Amino acid sequence: MSDAHADIDAYIADAPAKVRPILKKIRATVRKAAPGATEVISYRMPAFRGHGILLYFAAFKAHIGLFPPIRGDAAIEKTLAKYRGPKGNLQFRLNEPILYDLIARIAALRMWQDAASATKKRTPAKRRKTTR
């Protein structure tokens, strides 16, 4: 794959033929689970952005990587344990079925976390009362 891609279409087109359908389905899965998210290329990987980056996905020789590490939902975290790589990022091996339903749950969780984070940032801090 080349070093730079203008968009996700170019990234997928440059991927090995056997991986393209997987990348297309991941893209469609995330689009459906995170409506309103914007597609971008960031760090030379396809990504979806809300207020911040929701998730990245990328093709590697033997797996599809999903970034950043997923936290905040115990049930999802337990399911993801076998897919965690060295830094907590996810690695879905190409010789095993890709869990698109799980990817949809991850995208929905990240969308919710992104919205909650944006709301928290917009809420003005309470002013302290000072006595003189």
Image: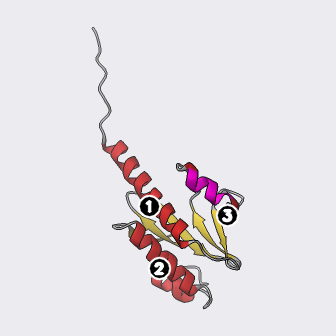
Task: Name the residue beneath numbered marker 3.
Answer: 83
> Magenta region: which residues?
75-81
Task: Decide which of 61, 7 is in the foreground and name it.
Answer: 61
Q: Is residue 43 visible?
A: no
Q: Residues within 10 Å of mark 1 (few under 14, many from 20)?
A: some
Residue 98 shows in the view = yes
Tell me the kind of residue under disc 2: Ile
Name which quarter of the figure residue 21 lies in: bottom right
Q: Compute the Cα span from label 1 to label 2.
A: 20 Å
Label 2 close to label 3 by CB (< 8 Å)? no
Identify the residue position indicated by label 1 in the image: 108
How far apart marks 2 and 3 lie (CA) works out to 24 Å
In the image, 91 versus 41, the foreground residue is: 91
Could you tell whether 112 is left or right of 131 in the image? right
Residue type of the residue flagged with mark 1: Ala
Look at mark 2 in the image and give the residue it sits on.
8
Magenta span: helix, strand or loop, mainly?
helix
Q: Residue at x 62, y 58 (%)?
A: 79
Mark 1, secondary structure of its residue: helix
Residue for point 52% across, 84% down: 12
Left-right relation of 81 to 21: right
Label 2 vs label 3, nearer the camera? 3
State the residue at coordinates (55%, 71%): 57
Q: Return the x and y of residue 90 as percentages of the image width and height.
A: 63, 64
Distance between the alpha carbons at the discs numbered 3 and 1: 18 Å
